[in-house]
Image: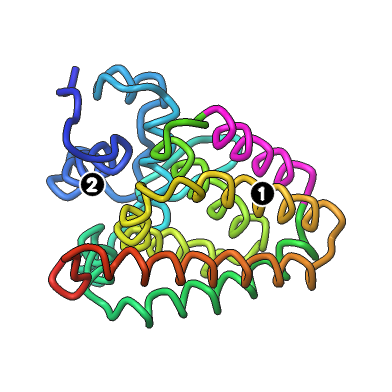
Amino acid sequence: MGREPTGKVLYRDIAEQIETAIMRGEWASGQKLPPLAELAARFAVSKAVVREACSLLMGAGLLEIRHGDGIYVQQLSLDTVLRPLQAALLLGQSDLRALLEVGLWMERGIAVAAAKRRTEADCANLVQALIHMDSGRGNIAVVLEGERMFHVALADASANVMASNLLRVLYHPMSSVMSLLTADTQLEELIMTVHRALYDSIVRMDGEAASRQIEMYRVALQDRVYEARKMTAWNPDAS
């Protein structure tokens, strides 16, 4: 049984442990990982945490899912080895305004594609994220995790693997940005309201409405982040 992670989001800690095991050769390129239940027992966390960790590693290019079979280690290249999870964290050193703009530009396109290509399974995943958000009312950390789950599911619904992977990477520094807003008493309601409307647009396959809602949400977050930044000594360029 692995140690219970502390001091950070659980799924990231588990992702780092799995990555370390891969890099030291415990699971070789092309090898199938143990079932989620076995990994959960090993790391002493829930299967949901392991699932999120594996999702993160898929975005980093270290794992791949073979539907109906299981999760496998990707064929590792020099490029893969030189850009593990730490490469995603380097984005956190980018300029704050540039980071928020990239998120807006990318997600508007993702929303349009998701509205056009979504499946019933994609809609079900979005519902699960909404349920996660709603279950966390009063606990902003849980709501923000549901928000992340929603946007990952939205990217997957776009049926564009590169966009899905890029969004997963982008959410590392975005999580640091969002941590600025945990004292915002109106943030929870903003997240719930916008994401319900966004879900409805995706279900209706209305890409234009989905794009507008993404823009409204990201611009509102930008305004809140800049205001919060004035109130703190937080410096994203030094993170």
Task: Indicate the secondary structure of the residue bearing disc 2.
Answer: helix
Which residue corresponds to the image point at 71% horizontal and 71% vertical from the top-left? Answer: 212
Expressed as whole percent of the image width and height from the top left, the position of residue 220 reads 54, 67
> What secondary structure prevails in the magenta region?
helix
The answer for how far apart the CA atoms under marks 1 and 2 are is 36 Å
Please name the residue that numbered disc 1 is placed on: 193
Q: How is the image coloured?
A: rainbow
Label 2: how many Cα within 10 Å (few below 14, some 14–19, many 20+): many
Expressed as whole percent of the image width and height from the top left, the position of residue 108 reads 63, 73
Q: Amino acid at mark 2?
A: Glu
- Dot 1 or dot 2: first in sequence order is 2
- Indicate the quadrant where residue 206 lies: bottom right
Label 1: how many Cα within 10 Å (few below 14, some 14–19, many 20+): few
Expressed as whole percent of the image width and height from the top left, the position of residue 37 reads 40, 19
Q: Specify whether residue 192 is painted magenta.
A: no
Image-based side of 88 in relation to 186, left or right: left
Foreground residue, 173 or 186? Answer: 186
Q: Amino acid at mark 1?
A: Thr
- Indicate the quadrant where residue 20 lies: top left
Foreground residue, 59 or 91? Answer: 91
Residue 51 higher or lower than 226, as above or below: above
Which residue corresponds to the image point at 18% horizontal and 75% vertical from the top-left? Answer: 237
- Indicate the quadrant where residue 18 lies: top left
Expressed as whole percent of the image width and height from the top left, the position of residue 13 reads 23, 39
Foreground residue, 136 or 1? Answer: 136
| Residue stretch rendered in magenta on the structure | 119-135
The N terminus - image quarter: top left
Q: Which mark is residue 19?
A: 2
Residue 147 higher or lower than 43, as above or below: below
Foreground residue, 190 or 94? Answer: 190
Task: Mark 1 and mark 2 in contact? Answer it, CB < 8 Å.
Answer: no
The C terminus - image quarter: bottom left
